[in-house]
Image: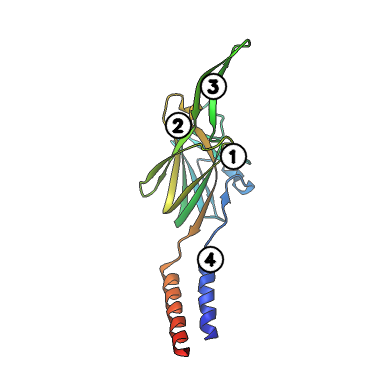
């Protein structure tokens, strides 16, 4: 009986261990991505890729990952037509994406003797799962931080800014990190089910 309980606890431990802490791209371990078109992190099994062709990843120890595309682009953010794709070695339960530098902003013309507000906007973006599902997101606060609750099984997710007039000013953001758990293997789930059935059987006999 004790051996059966130990087996059940061991299987439960495997499933719980599958839960990973958030991976922050602002961590120093990701600094080598800067200037690369693609970067693979062995520890997390995550690949970061920049598009379109000739675009490169940028790294910031606060904002995380952005994309540089074009000669005059010196930002550490993602704006149109740039796309950041986050891929995993295997399918995962994708919980959250942490967005940074997603601001409510305004454009002020300062003429010295008075200021004229020409525009006001909330920065927007879109994410697309490898399943084809797309979702728009928009800044929800003043500090530029936003947590996207995904809660889907996915192999990859792509993020890009909305295509609008002056999009490189009105819509851009960085990606600070990701939170996910691994999908338990079918064999592990089967073992867990058998163990629980066995435990229930022995408990019923004991009564």
Residue behind mark 3: 107
Q: Quick one: label 4, few (<14), some, or many (20+) residues within 10 Å?
A: few
Q: Tag 3's secondary structure?
A: strand
What is the x, y in percent for residue 21? Answer: 57, 56
Q: Earlier in the sequence, mark 3 or mark 4?
A: 4
Task: Decide which of 57, 76 is in the foreground and name it.
Answer: 76
Estimate how packed mark 1 is, as few (under 14), some (14 to 19) or many (20 or more) residues with alpha carbons within 10 Å.
Answer: many
- Label 4–label 1 contact, CB within 8 A: no
Whether 92 is drawn above or below 78: the answer is below
Image location (x, y in percent) of residue 88: 47, 53
Q: In front of the other: label 3 or label 1?
A: 3
| Residue under label 4 | 16
Which residue is pictured at 53% across the width and 52% down the height? 179
Q: Which residue is mark 1?
A: 63
Query: Which one is nearer the viewer's eye here, 103 or 39?
Result: 103
* Residue 128 numbered tag: none
Left or right placement of residue 47 versus residue 62 in this view = left
Badge 1 marks a residue whose secondary structure is loop
Distance Cα–Cα, label 3 vs label 4: 48 Å
**Residue topped by disc 2:** 80
Question: Mark 3 or 1 closer to N-term?
Answer: 1
The Cα–Cα distance between marks 1 and 2, rounded to whole angstroms, is: 18 Å
């Amino acid at each position: 009986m004790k051996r059966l309980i130990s087996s059940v606890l061991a299987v439960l431990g495997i499933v719980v261990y599958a839960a990973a802490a958030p991976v922050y791209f602002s961590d120093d371990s990701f600094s080598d991505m800067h200037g690369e078109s693609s970067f693979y992190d062995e520890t997390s099994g995550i690949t970061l890729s920049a598009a379109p062709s000739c675009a490169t990843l940028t790294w910031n120890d606060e904002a995380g990952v952005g994309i540089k595309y074009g000669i005059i682009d010196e930002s550490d953010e993602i704006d149109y037509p740039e796309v950041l794709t986050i891929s995993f070695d295997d399918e995962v339960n994708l919980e959250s994406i942490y967005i940074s530098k997603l601001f409510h902003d305004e454009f002020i013309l300062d003429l010295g003797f008075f200021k004229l507000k020409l525009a006001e906007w909330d920065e927007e973006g879109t994410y697309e799962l490898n399943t084809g599902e797309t979702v728009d997101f928009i800044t929800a606060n003043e500090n530029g931080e936003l947590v996207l609750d995904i809660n889907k099984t996915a192999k990859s997710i792509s993020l890009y800014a909305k295509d609008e007039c002056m999009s490189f000013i009105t819509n851009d953001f960085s990606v600070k990190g990701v939170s996910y758990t691994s999908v338990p293997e079918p064999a592990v789930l089967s073992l867990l089910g058998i163990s629980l059935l066995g435990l229930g059987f022995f408990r019923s006999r004991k009564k």
